[in-house]
Amino acid sequence: MVARDTLLKSLPKLVGRRILVIGDVFLDEYISGRATRLSREAPIPVLEFVGRRYVPGGAANPSNNIVALGGIAYQVGVIGDDEEGKTLLAKLKEAGIDAAAVVTDPSRPTTTKTRIVAQGSLRFPQQLARIDHLDRRPVAGKVEKAIVAHLEALVPQVDAVLISDYRTGVASEAVVTASLELARQHGKLATVDSQGNLHKFSGFDLVKCNQREAEAVLGRTLCSEDDFQAAHEQLLAELEVQAILITRGPEGMSLLGRDQPYAHIPSANVSEVFDVTGAGDTVIAVAALALAAGLDLLSAAHLANFAAGLVVRKLGNAAATSEELAWAIENW
């Protein structure tokens, strides 16, 4: 465990840290309506329109979490030449995220995830359906070269590099290679949130995945603490990374580093979970920000754990503020 006072005193250190976030940026659209009756056409509720809102999602969510804690986020990603792309850029700027390195690719749409949400007598709205508009082709040609050029310009200016791979094309082999090589060349921390192919990110300082992803890569189920420790040890060796962090849903998270013994951190909040959307983004964002601020791996993981416990109390992609995080440290 890490002392509460130690974590509280670490929060001001996060302010002003510069993180370069690379990955698949989305526009999350929420269309909400009030359920009034059942449809005669199908066994579904009829919603009377209440409102529509847009939130930066995908790799933009770690950036949002970084800014919420006083950090500075530089976004690298790809959008289409469409209205959704313009809306996403506007929302990134509105959130205080530097979006100058977001590249426009006219050949693909801006990834947009539309959620239909019903309001009613329940405490929280209920999501009924989601429609994704996307293109999973890996970036290539001029677009890929433009991304790498942005990396070459930005990596020397930041404290850490964070790749958020949502597997819709931005984290191509060339982009991943350039990110790691530039981080090494300039002595920057290199972190990643991988959603599948962990071996794609060999050599990074910190690799974060969830339990299901780790099980898929290892080809076995993880149940006991011995299972998780063995999994961490195997991945640490195979990937040749400095640290592995596995999120485990209601069981919290576990980690192992070259200089950090295996540790299991129980979930900070198991009683007020409303929506787990984006919790993994919060974990990698806070961990990267904390490590960039000079915190040790265990302290960084504890901060990330508290932050994740806060965002699952909110609807959709969300971020924890410094004030909220201080409250969680003091009360949980």
Image (cartoon, rainbow, N blue to C red):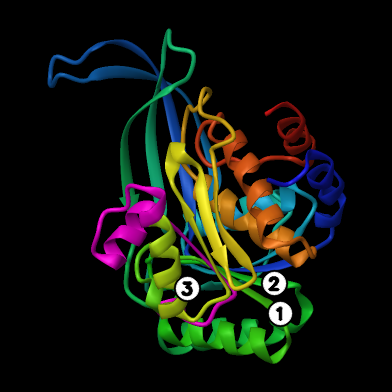
Residues at circles 2 and 1 in contact by the CB criterion of under 8 Å: yes
Res 95 seen here? yes
Q: What is the three-letter code of the residue carrying label 3? A: Leu
Image quadrant for the C terminus?
A: top right
The residue that disc 3 covers is 236
In the rendered structure, does residue 201 fall within the stretch colored magenta? yes
Q: What is the three-letter code of the residue carrying label 1? A: Lys
Residue 14: image x %, image y %? 80, 55
User: Measured along the vertical axis of the image, is residue 292 above or below residue 302?
Assistant: below
Disc with the residue nearer the chain's start (2 vs 1): 2
Quarter of image, res 257? bottom right
Name the side, left or right, on which 26 lies relative to 332: left
Label 2 and label 3: CA atoms lie apart by: 20 Å
Residue 165: image x %, image y %? 45, 66
Give me the residue at 26% from left, 54% from top: 221
Q: What is the three-letter code of the residue carrying label 2? A: Ala
Give me the residue at 53% from left, 23% from top: 272
Q: Is 113 in front, or is 218? A: 218
User: Measured along the vertical axis of the image, is residue 85 above or below residue 161?
Assistant: above
- Magenta-tinted stretch: 200-227
User: Measured along the vertical axis of the image, is residue 44 above or below residue 305?
Assistant: above
The residue that disc 1 covers is 188
The residue that disc 2 covers is 160
Quarter of image, res 187? bottom right
Name the side, left or right, on which 56 lies relative to 319: left
